[in-house]
Image (tube, rainbow, N blue to C red):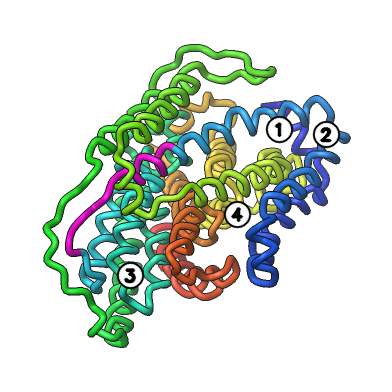
Amino acid sequence: MQETMVLGAHIPLWMVIPFIGILLSIAILPLVAPHFWHHNFGKVSLFWALACLIPFLIMFKGVALHEVLHTLIAEYIPFIILLASLYTIAGGIYIRGSLVGTPFLNTSILFIGSILASLMGTTGAAMLLVRPLIRANKWRKFKTFILVFFIFLVANIGGALTPLGDPPLFLGFLKGVPFLWTLKLFPIWITAVAILLGIYFIMDFYFYKKEDLSKKPSLNEKFSIEGKFNFILLLGVLLGVLFSGTFHLGEINIFGIHYPLQNLIRDIFLIILLLLSLMFTPQEIRIKNEFSWFPIKEVAILFIGIFITMIPCLKILEAGSHGPAKPLIEALSLPYHYFWATGTLSSFLDNAPTYLTFLMTALGKFYPGIPVHDAILKLIKEHPKYLEAISAGAVFFGAVTYIGNAPNFMVASIAREQGINMPSFFGYILKYSLVFLIPTFILLTYLFFI
């Protein structure tokens, strides 16, 4: 930790430019140069990654190389393996039946997905339900907002009730937060879900009345699920993730990076599950799902650039009051400060290390010098609102941008493949996040954190 602190304290602020650059590229290029972006987004990601890597390695040499390798080996590769396994396995499940996109059906899917997100992870729930939701609304003209609220609820806010729901909560579990503690977020969770579902239902009812109802399909197909074998594989993914956080089997050295053996076993297990899904799922199921590899490919290519350019930003943040982020860290004193600081940065940075940074900041504020596990238990007993604020901020604010949480980008990519006109990066923020999410978060602040 000391090495990280020293590194973060010496990174100049201009090193965040490549991260800002890749964000602006994702936001602007698809609008002003869509053809160029579609064929060259990999090169753009590589450009910004190199723009960060080259000066970073020149200035900090071996320490910087270690951080880059650690990010790739311990964070990016496991991240992609988990996403790819969930994407592939969920893509092998076909929900057949007379699903017709009405306000009641759509609202029900969003609510069910919000519950499933805490049980099988936001990525798992999103990948399981996004295709049936799209098929149910294929006949509708006004449907962009449906997918946006799906991102809000299923891909983000729904995952706040268990450590399996979202990576920052799982990281908290690994640090000593009791597994069932996150259920204490239920009042905050149900309030956010109720507000957004209520807004959604009103919007859907309004736009439904504007649809040409003569195009509404009249189907009598019996409800059934094909590819049920993949539900066992999904359960295997969840057990694999839980295994890696429960057992401690030592470490192995990979290019100088100490990687927990249980994590390596988990990664290999997830790859096996992915391959089993490909081997034993009939190809016609994936065809009916209109399954393609492009969404996961796009996420893998763009997020490697994001992960690399994010390194200086996170190290500056982790340096706390010893680095350029000192004014921000020292300004934190009340629970709502932590809710908004954790949330705002989680909208653009990886929410797992952001959660950990502000958790450590809170522990240092109240219990300096006390072992982390003991300090967390004392924080839960004496100042629970701070941990609730950090946890809710890290999970909820992931919905604010497309890059706030990985399934956001995947849902948007799948929707675009299906011909849905999803908003641009800035359009998503300006038309939806600022209009619906931020007022909701302000209300949550007054209800729970002040």
Of the residues shown, which amino acid type is indicated by label 2? Answer: Leu
On residue 68, which mark appears? Answer: 1
Q: Residue at x 43, y 57 (%)?
A: 449
* Amino acid tagged 1: Val
First along the sequence among labels 1 and 4 = 1
Residue 204 in view of the camera: yes
Given residues 31 and 151, the one toward you in this image is: 31
Looking at the image, do the residues carrying marks 4 and 2 touch, with CB atoms under 8 Å apart?
no
Residue type, numbered disc 3: Lys
* Residue numbers of the magenta segment: 85-98
The percent coordinates of residue 303 (x first, y second) are 61, 46
Residue position marked by numbered label 2 in the rendering? 57
Characterize the local packing of mark 1: few (<14), some (14-19) or many (20 or more) Cα atoms within 10 angstroms: some
Identified at 34% across, 34% down, the residue is: 277
Task: Answer with left or right where residue 371 lies relative to residue 67.
Answer: left
The residue wearing badge 3 is 138
| N-term-proximal mark, 3 vs 4 | 3
Name the residue that disc number 4 marks: 348
Separation of residues labelled 1 and 4 (CA atoms): 19 Å
